[in-house]
Amino acid sequence: MAKEKFSPADYSTEDLAVELQNREREYQQMKFDHAAKGIANPMELRELRRDIARIHTEVRNRELAEMSPDQLEMRSKIRARRRRQK
């Protein structure tokens, strides 16, 4: 049976922070176990890493949604300035 995909949109912001800490801790432990003795399914590492990325993306999307139009305008100016500097 296929494992259900993690959906961070269902969580509150505080729950996401807790879930992120738990998943990062679990990832570090799993990485250590895999290096030391190997784990049964190394694909779990990839799935956990992707779940962590999904959480980071959702947190950033929520930050951007809470920004005022002035803050978004300033953000666009900063990004444009960084592109010109390259």
Image (spheres, helix red, strand yellow):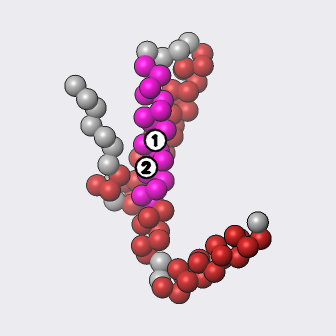
Residue 17 shows in this picture: no
What secondary structure is found at the residue carrying circle 2?
A: helix
In the rendered structure, does residue 48 fall within the stretch colored magenta? Answer: yes
> Which residue sits at x=28%, y=32%?
3
> Which residue sits at x=73%, y=73%?
84
Q: Local crowd at mark 2 within 10 Å, few (<14), some, or many (≥20)? A: some
Q: Which residue is mark 2?
A: 54
Q: Nearer the viewer, residue 71 or 12?
A: 71
**Image location (x, y in percent) of residue 43:** 44, 26
Q: Nearer the viewer, residue 14 or 8?
A: 8
Q: Nearer the viewer, residue 56 or 76?
A: 76
Image quarter hosting the N terminus: top left
Q: Which dot marks residue 36? A: none
**Image location (x, y in percent) of residue 10:** 28, 55
Q: Do tag 2 and tag 1 residues touch (Cβ < 8 Å)?
A: yes
Given the image, on which type of amino acid does mark 2 rest?
Arg
Range of the magenta residues? Answer: 41-59
Image quarter hosting the C terminus: bottom right
> Which residue sits at x=32%, y=56%?
9
Q: With respect to residue 60, does 76 lie above or below?
A: below
Q: Which dot marks residue 50? A: 1
Residue 61 shows in this picture: yes
Given the image, on which type of amino acid does mark 1 rest?
Arg
- State left or right for residue 83 relative to residue 12: right
Q: CA distance from mark 2 to mark 1?
A: 6 Å
Q: Local crowd at mark 1 within 10 Å, few (<14), some, or many (≥20)? A: few
What secondary structure is found at the residue carrying circle 1?
A: helix
